[in-house]
């Protein structure tokens, strides 16, 4: 077995001889080692100091540069190195403009007149819930789902409604559907109830040269001259991109609003009323597809008037027309079932109505937005409904006629992507059982 011999062992052997040469060698080694240690310590200290100084300088320069950038306009010549604090003539930064414009205020009608989710149909056959005006349409499979395929050359269909087939809209109604459109001409016509298919009250049109267009008759006009209202975003948004888009149309006495994917595209303030029925028409070289059609009476109030006003007349009207009263004015502490004090005025009016209709039984339903998990929202909505029932009982309502139920975020009526939509979804419903 070989033995390794270290330098220090050799030095120790030489020292053992007592020679002058060995002593000198040892001293040189010791001095070199000490100097090496000194050099390393000095280098580390210098590097640490340099890094600290660099950070201080960089921070000062960056701070001055950012301050200077905030004090000059983008079109000025700016040199943060030569003049990091800006120039005496630099323009002060103007405060950022804050704009708020609600664009997701769609409220679906509550009395469903017609609904077709396009499921359970025979592929290749004419859709069973529709009537044919002209041309042809068939059931097709699109990305694994059934949809109505409009024939490429000419398709004109209308909802198959047995009761009042040409007069089912009324003064307030909403229409919703999903559409996949690529090219050609697609239109929805809202017809006069007492006239033929050339009696459009207003028409929504998709075309190759524009994204969306609305033709309507002014309420003040005695003639049939149409007023054209193009989408304000038709140059920014392409709707013929071979993707599904959700469309919603709201008519309320005189106001037409059109929404795409939850965002309002059009807002016509004074259109002529009188539409009774509707048709869907398509002509093009490539087919169009449609699904999830829903037509309902009712909807949002004109220009956002409080649709949940709990006056006795408003409650009675809502229940008579829809079988329920819906309110967003019963408020709770965030994430809790504790009623806010300002909610009691609304609850008192509901209690007054219920006591005057003592034989009626109600389901009190709580709804939340989609913040949090489905489980936590379900639990929270149940607790909030019970809090409302307890409050009504304290005001003299017979709790035997009340049942609390929570539905969490499972039944949204607005887009949960916006604060306004979430506020609409946080609601309480009083449903007659």
Image (cartoon, rainbow, N blue to C red):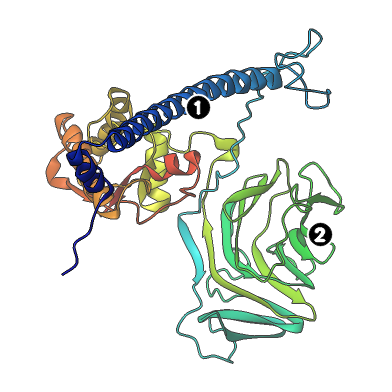
Find residue 146 and report its horizontal and vertical position in percent: 52, 81
Residue positioned 54% across, 41% down in the render: 301
Horizontally, residue 227 falls left or right of residue 382, namely: right
Pick whichever, 191 or 264, lies toward us.
Answer: 264
- Residue 135 to residue 47: above or below: below
- Residue 178 to residue 251: above or below: below
Read off the residue under disc 1: 51
Find residue 258 and report its horizontal and vertical position in percent: 65, 52
Residue at the far top in the pictured view? 88
Answer with the quarter of the image where residue 339 lies: top left
Horizontally, residue 260 falls left or right of residue 421, namely: right
Horizontally, residue 214 falls left or right of residue 364, namely: right
Answer with the quarter of the image where residue 100 lies: top right
Find residue 4 and report its horizontal and vertical position in percent: 22, 59
Q: Is residue 358 visible?
A: no
Residue positioned 73% across, 13% down in the render: 92
Read off the residue under disc 2: 210
Judge the density around disc 1: few (<14), some (14-19), many (≥20) Cα neighbours within 10 Å: few
Q: Is residue 290 visible?
A: yes
Q: Earlier in the sequence, mark 2 or mark 1?
A: 1
Cα distance between the residues tagged 2 and 1: 60 Å
* Mark 2 secondary-structure assignment: strand
Find residue 132 and report its horizontal and vertical position in percent: 66, 82
Answer with the quarter of the image where residue 397 lies: top left
- Residue 303 to residue 128: above or below: above
* Mark 1 secondary-structure assignment: helix
Quadrant in which the C terminus is drawn: bottom left
């Amino acid at each position: 077995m070989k033995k390794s011999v270290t330098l220090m062992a050799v030095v120790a052997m030489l020292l053992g001889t007592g020679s002058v040469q060995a002593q000198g060698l040892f001293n040189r080694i010791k001095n070199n080692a000490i100097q090496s240690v000194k050099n390393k310590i000095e280098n580390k200290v210098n590097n640490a100091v340099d890094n600290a100084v660099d950070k201080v300088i960089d921070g000062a320069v960056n701070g001055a540069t950012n301050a200077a950038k905030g004090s000059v306009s983008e079109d000025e010549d700016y040199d943060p190195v030569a003049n990091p604090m800006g120039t005496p003539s630099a323009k002060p930064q103007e405060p950022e403009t804050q704009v708020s414009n609600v664009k997701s205020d769609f409220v679906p009608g509550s009395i469903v007149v017609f609904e077709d989710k396009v499921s359970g149909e025979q592929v290749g056959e004419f859709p069973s819930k529709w009537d044919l005006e002209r041309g042809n349409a068939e059931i097709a499979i699109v990305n694994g789902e059934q949809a109505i395929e409009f024939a490429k050359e000419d398709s004109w269909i209308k909802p198959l409604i047995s009761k009042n087939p040409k007069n089912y809209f009324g003064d307030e109604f909403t229409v919703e559907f999903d559409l996949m459109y690529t090219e050609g001409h697609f239109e929805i016509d809202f017809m006069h109830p007492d006239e033929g298919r050339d009696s459009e009250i207003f028409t929504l049109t998709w075309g190759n040269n524009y994204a969306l267009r609305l033709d309507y008759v002014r309420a003040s006009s005695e003639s049939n001259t149409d007023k054209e209202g193009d989408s304000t975003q038709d140059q920014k948004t392409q709707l013929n991109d071979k993707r599904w888009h959700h469309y919603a149309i709201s008519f309320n006495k005189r106001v037409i609003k059109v929404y795409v994917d939850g965002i309002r595209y059009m807002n016509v303030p004074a259109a002529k009323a009188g539409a009774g029925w509707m048709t869907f028409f398509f002509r093009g070289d490539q087919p169009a597809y449609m699904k999830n059609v829903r037509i309902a009476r009712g909807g949002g109030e004109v220009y956002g008037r409080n649709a949940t006003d709990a006056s006795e007349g408003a409650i009675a009207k809502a229940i008579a027309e829809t079988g329920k009263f819906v309110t967003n004015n019963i408020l709770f502490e965030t994430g809790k079932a504790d009623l806010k004090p300002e909610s009691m005025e609304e609850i008192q009016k509901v209690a007054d109505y219920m006591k005057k209709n003592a034989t009626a039984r109600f389901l009190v339903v709580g709804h939340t937005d989609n913040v949090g998990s489905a489980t936590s929202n379900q639990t929270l909505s149940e607790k909030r409904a019970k809090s409302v029932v307890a409050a009504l009982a304290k005001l003299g309502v017979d709790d035997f006629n009340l049942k609390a139920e929570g539905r969490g975020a499972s039944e949204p009526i607005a887009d949960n992507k916006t604060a306004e939509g979430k506020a609409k979804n946080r609601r309480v419903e009083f449903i007659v059982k």
